[in-house]
Amino acid sequence: MPWRTLVCLSMLALVVAPAAAIDERVAPPGPGGRPGPRPAAPIEAAERPAYTIGHKWFLTDGTYELKRLDGRDYVFVGPGRELRLTPELAVAGVRRGADYVEFRPPPRLKWPLRAGLWGSGETNWRVSRLPKNVAGLSTAGGLRVTWQVRASEDVTVPAGRFTAWRIDYEVFQTGGGGLQTPVWQFSTWYAPAVQQLVKADDGGTGWLSFEVASIEGTPPAVATVPTPPAAAATPPVAAPAPPARVAPTPSGDTEAPRIVINYPAADTKVESEQIVVLGVVSDNVGVDRVQVTVNGVEVPQERGVQARGRALRVPATLRPGDNVIEITATDKAGNVSQVVRTITRLVAAVPPSPAPVVKAASRWAVIIGVGTYTNPAIPRLRYATRDAEAMYGFLTTKGGYPKDNVLLLTDGAGQKPTLQNIRRALGEFLYRKPGREDMVLIYYAGHGAPEVDAAGNETDGLSKYLIPADAEPESLYSTALPMDEIQRIFARIPAERIVMLLDTCYSGTAGGRTFMRQQIRAGSINDQFLERLTRSRGRVIITASGPNEVALESSELGHGVFTYFLLQGLAGKADRNGDGVVTVSELYEYVEEQVDRRARAEGGRQRPLMKGEVEGTLPLAQVGK
């Protein structure tokens, strides 16, 4: 599908539509995304892999390193390009220099992965800019993305031959009457043996195509299984089978060149990193070209000397584990022959290096809960005060925060959650107390609200506010706390690491922790203001829901849904690697999964977001081993 068609549809990112629940079934979709006939019994399933910061993929255009987590997404950074993947290895977006294209929300693959699994859901595009040649094209309608796991197949890439599941994606433009028009197709291949994507093909647009050039180091741990204490050996890469001889040329010569390898022998095992491949290539009419590749990378050889025999002396650098060496010879009549050797380099297994844990000198926190408002026009919240008190209780006991380092502002506390007290706590207490090496946690439970942005600074045209106890709904600008002020507060705090947890929302939808004083078009809010707030390194914000979703309270749980799972996660349920420390990335992954599942079970939609990044692994709570 040409890029001009793809990008013109990306203008839909200017209007963010709510995402529909994604259907997940074990039956392939038929025309227009409708379920087709059920497939045969599925093949063996694969568990989802998990990667840590610093993990590398070696692709044909360079090395890609997992530099950061953006929300739930993995961000692999390579030469001139960023690949954004969800933890389920669905494609979330690609960035090339200043240009980018992203799914919002991305497709949600379902694991354990197995053939026949598929899903479909509404989405939108976010892009940086449109090429000039698509200006003026229609972008009416919505978008829907469908994915399907095909039967396993052998795929050959420069790193070798792998058995992989092909995952096909198709993006449709949706219109009236249920019409769906295909606008883009792309595929990825996941190989369980090496626990990564080994190939992607985007139909020629150039944004997503890649192949794996080599497999280095040990594979990542499977997400549902604890990492073993010692690293497993590098997974073997099967050597490609020698191809059949090329058909004879019209010259009449049908004899292919003869390749004799004197060293190394087949299936040789060595400890040295460097070896020299020795041999002879001969032909009855003359050798035209000899091509040697080591793990898919060509070693330059002389060409054009049409002697009947040629000696081989080729240096090869071996990586740990299996190495595939291919020698391909062509004679002047065009006949081809090939010999393949698999050489194993033996090395001691080295456990993978964990991401560095950032240790804060001291921990500071401001906890705010607003349940009762002075103005009766602002709805009362049943559990916001209880949420804040529970968070304070956890942090100052099991969480390891000294009581003198934590301020609590609630209806029943010594300091009420008024606008003046909130400003003083965030802008003065956190300005004067923490040091540069310390960590700061800010928690807020209460109403959020939008209003029309009269200054024109917001891309969605809406200003967002946190609502203190003494706010006036008809005068939010002067009586509430603008989210833009959080950016200035962040700049005042000397600590290099700040985490903000917001159990609130800004959609204005009834039934959650939000209200609306003005009529605002549904589905018009975006999350770019959060990206602006976390632009500086070391600032992370986790919100209870997406920009057009509702932060729910639950009488069954006795808390806001988001806070309930925050507390569960901090108490140890988010400690997925069992090291006794709950990090910010572990907490987000746990809370996002649990809140999303709970909301779906109740027929709603609430999916927490995380914005920002920190160096290494930031611990939020010590829960013991």
Image (tube, helix red, strand yellow):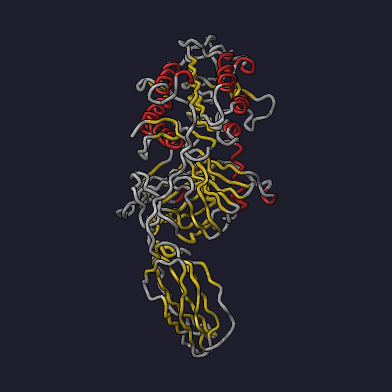
Is 144 on the left-hand or right-hand side of 98? left
Q: Residue at x 52, y 29 (%)?
A: 438
For this rendering, which residue is in front, 623 or 604? 623
Q: Position of residue 429 (x, y in %)?
A: 56, 19
Q: Residue at x 55, y 18 (%)?
A: 425
Quadrant that contains the C terminus: top left
**Which residue in the rendered view is the most extreme toward the left?**
41
Residue 547 seen in render: no
For this rendering, which residue is in front, 485 or 435? 435
- Image quadrant in which you'd find residue 243: bottom left
Q: Residue at x 37, y 20 (%)?
A: 558
Q: Position of residue 349 (x, y in %)?
A: 37, 56
Residue 244 seen in render: yes
Quadrant that contains the N terminus: bottom right
**Total count of labels:** 0
- Relative height, residue 247 to residue 178 (above, below): below
- Relative height, residue 395 to residue 50 (above, below): above
Q: Position of residue 603 (x, y in %)?
A: 40, 30
For this rendering, which residue is in front, 392 or 159? 392
Q: Residue at x 42, y 32 (%)?
A: 591
Q: Position of residue 541 (x, y in %)?
A: 52, 31
